[in-house]
Amino acid sequence: MGNSNSTTTMTSVPKPNSHYKCRNCQYPRGGPQRYAVPDDKVSWKTNYPEYAPPEFTSESVSSGPVWADPGVTEKGPPPLKWNTVHGKVNRVSHMGQYEVVNGLPQNPVGRTGIRSRGHLGRWGPNHAADPIVTRWKRDKNGSKVIHPTTKKPILQFVAIQRKDSGEWAIPGGMVDAGERVSVTLKREFAEEAMNSLEANSEEKEKIKKSLETLFSKGVEVYRGYVDDPRNTDNVWMETVAYNFHDDTGDSVGKFNLNAGDDAGNVKWTDISSSLQLFASHVDFIEKVAKKNNAHW
Ligand code: RP5
């Protein structure tokens, strides 16, 4: 048998390029165990007749805060307009048109083993923005630190430790209804990494000024789906990630990092392929490392 024949007869399981963090595990913070979804059953195109995922909506969402949509009632699914901006709420996905099944949006990447809204407020896409603030790692003489193996300079980014899961993450956050992404990026960074919520008005003004300059020169590195542990079959996170790079170390390098809001800790973190971060944040960081020709 020749090689060409053996490749055609090989049984290969297609590997999904996502759903590592929102599949085959316990739903976070009090949620149920997700229904098992093997790699070859992630796609909605694959038949999975026995699939019976549990439903879960957390109390914080079902109690009807302003940031959450109405739930399913005896009259059926909420009468919202999908795949469009409805009122001020952006229900358009970066992934293109999503399916609506039995009146509810369907996760565009595939099965997650759980239904309903979990901890997320919006049916369908929940939009976030992620500011990746970077500088070069420098020694005490101010020279860039070069990695001995790759011979490339080491980049550092501002990471926060999330209070909800304890994992390290990019200090991103939800885009408020009607808010511009550029505003969310600055607001979230100021709140989570510089604790601007606790600052007095003079300090707030200083933080605002230094961020204005840095954040005016961002480069978009990613736009799309996030493999977030809160995703379900009907709700999922999407983001726009920007890199704000301080090449000389003169602006960001001087920032006083100070954890606030949803962050328990904040620190400059060396970028390398061994990083372990919340959701699929490591994928965005890899793009930043490659873009800056840094060690990975
Ligand atoms: C992730 O959740 C996004 O990439 C963003 O970092 C974050 C937004 O959620 P919260 O931090 O507001 O909970 O999917």
Image (cartoon, grey):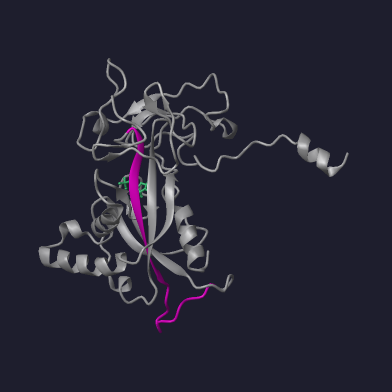
46 is within the stretch colored magenta? no
On the question of residue 39 being in view, the answer is yes
User: What stretch of residues is rendered in magenta?
Assistant: 123-147
Tell me the residue at 19%/36% (across/down).
Answer: 66
Q: Position of residue 140 (x, y in %)?
A: 39, 81
Residue at screen point 15% across, 61% down:
199
Query: Residue sitting at 47 percent across and 76 percent down?
Result: 145
**Residue 79 image-quadrant placement:** top left
Task: Compare residues 139 and 286 and report the one nearer the observer.
Answer: 286
Q: Residue 163: image x %, image y %?
A: 30, 48
Q: Nearer the viewer, residue 286 or 156?
A: 286
Direction from residue 87 to residue 152 in the image, left or right? right
Q: Residue furthest bottom?
A: 141
Query: On screen, 272 above or below 262?
Result: below
Residue 236 lies, with reference to residue 272, above or below; the image says above
On-image quarter of the N terminus: top right
**227 is higher (above) or lower (below) than 160:** above
Residue 256, can we see it? no
| Residue most extreme to the right | 1
Where residue 108 appears, as percent x and y from the top left, is: 46, 35
Q: Quadrant of residue 85?
A: top left
Residue plotted at (50% across, 73% down): 153
Q: Position of residue 211 (x, y in %)?
A: 26, 66
Task: Tell me: 71 left or right of 170.
Answer: left
- Residue closest to the eye, 237 or 240: 240
Q: Residue furthest left?
A: 201
Total numbered labels placed on residues in the image: 0
Would you place residue 65 above or below residue 164 in this image? Answer: above
